[in-house]
Image (cartoon, rainbow, N blue to C red):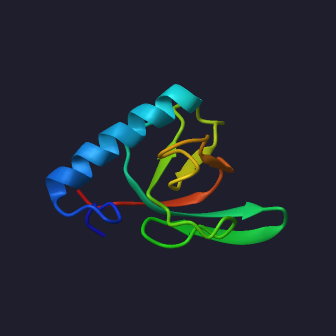
């Protein structure tokens, strides 16, 4: 899957928004990897879940805007929706052993 952000009207706008979201996440959660994730498969409270950019996040129902991974190998994935990591609030934490799918370059 080629990189995109939901609701971005152009690749330039997607890049601008992504940079702003990433900066906000770093303020909230610390350094993140320079990898762009499209989706992650993870477990939460004994349930198998999938978070995919552009799709509803399974716990909140809000659209997933971006997914990051902390630089710490044992740190979590960070799932960002409008109210969790984009406009306000901390991102949703997903287990560090999630199976991740990256955007194609």
Identified at 59% across, 67% down, the residue is: 57
Asked if 31 appears above or below 10 in the picture, the reply is above
Q: Quadrant of the N terminus?
A: bottom left
Counting from the top left corner in percent of width and height, residue 103 is at: 33, 60
Counting from the top left corner in percent of width and height, residue 71 is at: 51, 32
Counting from the top left corner in percent of width and height, residue 78 is at: 57, 46
Identified at 23% across, 48% down, the residue is: 15
Q: Quadrant of residue 6?
A: bottom left
Identified at 34% across, 38% down, the residue is: 20
Asked if 95 appears above or below 19 in the picture, the reply is below
Asked if 31 appears above or below 8 in the picture, the reply is above
Report the number of numbered marks.
0
Q: Quadrant of the C terminus?
A: bottom left
Q: Is residue 52 left or right of residue 5?
A: right
Front residue of 36/61: it is: 61
Q: Quadrant of residue 42?
A: bottom right
Front residue of 72/55: it is: 55
Identified at 78% across, 70% down, the residue is: 47
Residue 37 visible (yes or no): yes
Asked if 9 appears above or below 17 in the picture, the reply is below
Residue 32 visible (yes or no): no
Counting from the top left corner in percent of width and height, residue 94 is at: 66, 52
Q: Is residue 68 left or right of residue 84?
A: left
């Amino acid at each position: 899957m080629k990189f995109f952000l939901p609701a971005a009207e152009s690749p330039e706008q997607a890049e601008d928004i992504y940079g702003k979201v990433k900066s906000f996440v770093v303020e909230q959660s610390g350094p993140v990897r320079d990898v762009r994730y499209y989706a992650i498969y993870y477990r939460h409270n004994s349930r198998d879940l999938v978070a995919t950019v552009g799709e509803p996040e399974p716990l909140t129902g809000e659209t997933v805007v971006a997914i990051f991974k902390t630089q710490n190998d044992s740190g979590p994935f960070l799932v960002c929706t409008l109210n969790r990591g984009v406009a306000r609030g901390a991102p949703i934490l997903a287990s560090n052993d999630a199976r991740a799918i990256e955007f194609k370059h």
